[in-house]
Image (cartoon, coloured by chain):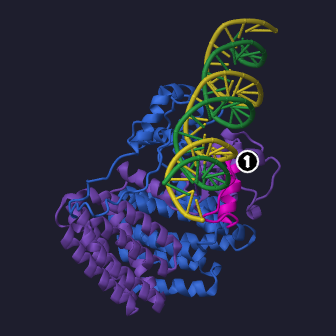
Chain colours: A blue, B purple, C green, D yellow
Amino acid sequence: MTGQARSHSRRVDGSGPKPGSATLEEHDEHDEVSFRPIRPVRSYERIVEQIEEAIVEGRLREGDFLPSEREMMSQFSVSRSTVREAMRVLESSGLVRSRPGNPNGAEVLGLSTVALRKTVDRLVTGRRIRLVHLIHFRMLMESSANMLAARLRTSEDLAAMKAALEEMRVAMPRGHEAFCAADVRFHGLVAQVSGNALIQMFSEVVHDVVLGMISPAIAGSQQGASMMELSLLHHADALEAIRAKDAPRAGRIARENLFEHFGALLPPEDCTAVRLLLDACAHG
Amino acid sequence: MTGQARSHSRRVDGSGPKPGSATLEEHDEHDEVSFRPIRPVRSYERIVEQIEEAIVEGRLREGDFLPSEREMMSQFSVSRSTVREAMRVLESSGLVRSRPGNPNGAEVLGLSTVALRKTVDRLVTGRRIRLVHLIHFRMLMESSANMLAARLRTSEDLAAMKAALEEMRVAMPRGHEAFCAADVRFHGLVAQVSGNALIQMFSEVVHDVVLGMISPAIAGSQQGASMMELSLLHHADALEAIRAKDAPRAGRIARENLFEHFGALLPPEDCTAVRLLLDACAHG
DNA sequence: CGGTGATGGTGGTCCGGCCAGTATGCTACG
DNA sequence: CGTAGCATACTGGCCGGACCACCATCACCG
């Protein structure tokens, strides 16, 4: 029966020309039918598809457990190797985590951004993205998030953001790392209030990557304390703008604060480039 | 450095006091040493790390070929299953592609955005991101890209962009799909001229996702032709602003064009939300 | 009653094997 | 002499079985 399944899956991709999107063009027999290259369908991929679909559609939720590999191998009627390859893919996407010895099977983690994070990390270590680019991007994300938050915030949101700011304050004496963690939470909250999950996601990832980039430079330096003080003031400013529902100001504060915070870490030419961007935004 | 970054983000939730940045706190021996949870290192992961590092650092370039699985299994001194699991992970990140029967081994594809694309796709099909969010994001990306391109473009860049626009024109009679492909290329070029790889990447991915979302709605409708005409005019506008090095105008045009293009596809309340954003940008 | 060991199941890894596919070179035919 | 066709020697995809370290559970024992 495995043989059947295999030969079947081979035939799937042998499909003919696609008449679907041909409404605009004549079907002249002299015209090329524009075949597209076929990619063999591997059976582990179909397993990935099924499980991924179940997670995305919510049939499998965070905290649920997948069947054990040995049971899946009978449910999917494939070998364990194939199941395992599917698990590796799912795990590398952050959808699932499997621990050895766990009698429950692999745990479902839900949608995550670890793959996204890895992609950006690779680009950074590959020198294709420099700090300016990340800062510029954060300016776009956070100023937008702030503007949206200023428009959309409820009083509960405001209370939560105040609490997050307070957390940053109390985290300050616990060191730079704890402070950064609270900082990430604060921005995450603002992004969440903004209502745009895309901005929230990208913002968080890039924020994280930036911290990973500069933390070695910051760790040893003594400027940590004053920087945290300054950062706290900036965040309070932004929060005040959001409270007052002053969207333009909230956006501008986000950009200026980022510039003040990271300007010193940028090479001079990058610094001026970012400044140009700031001006451009002001006149956009 | 990925390792650094990862362990950094681990510590965030581990929450204990960090001796690393402990210039502010005493190192009391009664203090907890804040052990971190152990994650077993699986051998396939170390293979992934090695190959990934080689690709990121450029020792393996696009078009190169990895050794065959049977040879890797002796080089890494692991079994073939382990090698294969590593290959599955690398393949799901888009770093590598392996075809059955290829005597050269797996092909190196270089850094790619397929993982990113998949992540966003999942969020879209999981209803966590709606069309507004994508459009909003595209406004941010493309207006920024246009502004930067307007400042940084060389005359060669300008010529290339003109050529890309011309390609869109000639692709128009070949149907909506071909036109969209040329459209993506045009925007990709602008993003490339902007010099920010992060914007380029995210912009391209989201553009792609948007096309995937609306193409079923567009395919059948007959408004394709007029929309393409309009789109062509808009792109010509943007290009003219970039030619004139008028950054603010280039940015504004990008936002307005997106609004005009997709406004009709948005639910009314989302439409007004985006309009608010447009105004906010104008006064930011 | 609380610790403790056996136990059954789990994931991680290995092995050896079969199959379908492909690139290459050789052969046989035109 | 050139080319079409075939054999070959690889490749990756998949299988089934096996071993191990690990973990949760629970019956057993002090």
Magenta segment boundaries in residue numbering: B47-69
Q: In this view, does D21 lie above or below B264?
A: above
Depth check: give the residue in front, B54 or A64: B54
Q: Is residue B236 above or below residue B5?
A: below
**Lateral position of residue B52 relative to residue A15, left or right:** right
| Residue at figure coordinates x 48%, y 77% from the top left | B192
Packing grade of label 1 (10 A; few <14, some 14-19, many >=20) is some
| Residue at figure coordinates x 63%, y 73% from the top left | A227
Depth check: give the residue in front, B13 or B94: B94
Pointer 1 indicates a residue of which chain? B
- The part of the image, by quadrant, that contains residue D16 is top right
Q: Is residue B148 above or below residue A207?
A: below
Q: Where is residue A113 in the image (x, y as percent from the top left)?
A: 51, 54
Q: Position of residue A3 (x, y in %)?
A: 49, 29
Q: Does the magenta stretch include residue B49?
A: yes
Q: Quadrant of the N terminus of chain B?
A: bottom right
Q: Can residue A223 be seen in this view?
A: yes
Depth check: give the residue in front, A201 or A93: A93
Q: Does the magenta stretch include residue A117?
A: no
Q: Is residue A182 visible?
A: no
Q: Where is residue C28 in the image (x, y as percent from the top left)?
A: 59, 47
- The part of the image, by quadrant, that contains residue A4 is top left
Residue position for label 1: B71
- Secondary structure type for disc 1: helix
